[in-house]
Image (cartoon, rainbow, N blue to C red):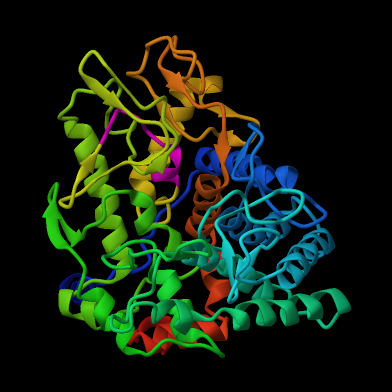
Amino acid sequence: MKTFLLCLLTLTIGLAQPRPYTFTKTDNAFLDSLEYDTFRFFWETANPENGLIPDRAPTPSFSSIAAVGFGLTSYLVGVERGYITRKQAADRTLNTLRFFAKAPQSDKTVGIAGYKGFFYHFLDMKTGERFKKVELSTIDTALLLGGILSAQTYFDKNTPTESEIRKLADQIYGRVDWTWIQNHNGSAPYISMGWHPEKGFIPANWKGYNEAMLLYILALGSPTHPVGSEVWAAWTKTYDWATFEGQTHVNFDPLFGHQYSHLWIDFRGIQDSYMKAKGIDYAENSRRATYANRAYCIKNPANWQDYSATIWGLTACDGPKDTTVAGRHFFSYRARGAASTQIVDDGTIAPTAAGGSIAFAPEICLPALQAMKTKYGAHLYGKYGFVDAFNPTYRYPSAFANGSTKDGWFDIDYLGIDQGPILLMAENARTGFVWNLMKRNPYIQKGLKRAGFSGGWLK
């Protein structure tokens, strides 16, 4: 009777509790291979001298600072899984943090890596300097910091290397001036999406539910330049709460927005005021968004090739080409997705959409990954796991398509910001490793509490 009442209470309040899911021997063998192959992207493509990780590979590329953040946490998974030693991970991490701590920061347009503690979205792989005229990116800096703080928490031994990692992490995080980029318009509490030395702040702010949960939590938890606690309530007022494909949740069309912040923070069982009023938590919200994305693909209103209960997943990813063929519109890199807010769908599926949600809904995400690998084989799965995306409908010969189109379009590249969610969420689904690690980080705890989160593991 006691167990029944507990289950009834859980259903009544709607909180996403740890969902018991037993991975079979076959499941674990699949995930063992997927995690190892995906890990190798970060370990093998990085510049070991400065720790920078390319935006994509094998196509020659600049570095994505967000990919570096994912990579730093992937090294910890690598240690836990036995892919590399703790010393190897610590040495690579230390090189990376030394680079970011010493990289030149100023308001100059060239020869620098960042300003006011933030870093430019893309950096040259060798020099570490700003790539062309990209923006000083607040969200990509936040994703980099997610990786840096995970390393700070993990490397807790009293050795010269690990002590320096912790010291540098504090230095890099503490240098970020969140209030400078928040107060760009003198009134609204929102944080700007970025800044250019040539023309100033980007007009767009972080509003509406998206991947900026982590950004605001880090800004609230800052030990040096914290934003006011009112920013979280202001941000949640811009959410779109609606029902899409039978799932009532805070809508945001590409799935990555429901995943990125959750790579490091376990939102199961903790709530802010907004979610308390709705009777769920953000993990449940992501689960519903995942089911809605899949339901839309199953319905397949545009009749794209191969969409099904196991071939699905719309998010930001590569695509075949920006073109219109036979009345159908296709895109190159773009944020694809489906929600009440908008639908962007050109028949391109990204494995990271299902992979990044595996910790929320393993019962539908794992079969999708397995089916995609089985169906498309070497077209889709290679040296570093899943290539970024594929489009079975696109079978139009084109010299500009990034990949073969004979049997549909298949990417030739792996993208760091899409490989990261696959690896880290697979590990969270299996062991909760990254989530449990970050529960110990005082900055994450402080940020969550200042945002008004309570309950669960925050007690």
Q: Residue furthest right?
A: 160
Residue 433 placement (x, y as % from top left): 57, 65
Image-quadrant location for residue 203: bottom left
The correct choice, above or below, for 37 with respect to 439 in the image is above
Residue closer to the observer: 436 or 6: 436
Question: Which stretch did the figure color magenta?
Answer: 345-355
The answer to whether 147 is drawn above or below residue 57 in the figure is: below
Residue 348 appears in the picture as rendered:
yes
The answer to whether residue 2 is visible is no
Residue at the (26%, 82%) spot, across then down:
233
Q: Quadrant of residue 318?
A: top left
Residue pictured at 50% horizontal, 41% vertical: 27
Where is 195 relative to 314, above or below? below
Question: Which is nearer the eye, 454 or 406?
Answer: 406
Between 89 and 99, the residue placed more toward the observer is 99
Residue 125 placement, left or right of 175: right
Residue at image x 44%, y 71%?
215
Specify whether residue 349 is painted magenta.
yes
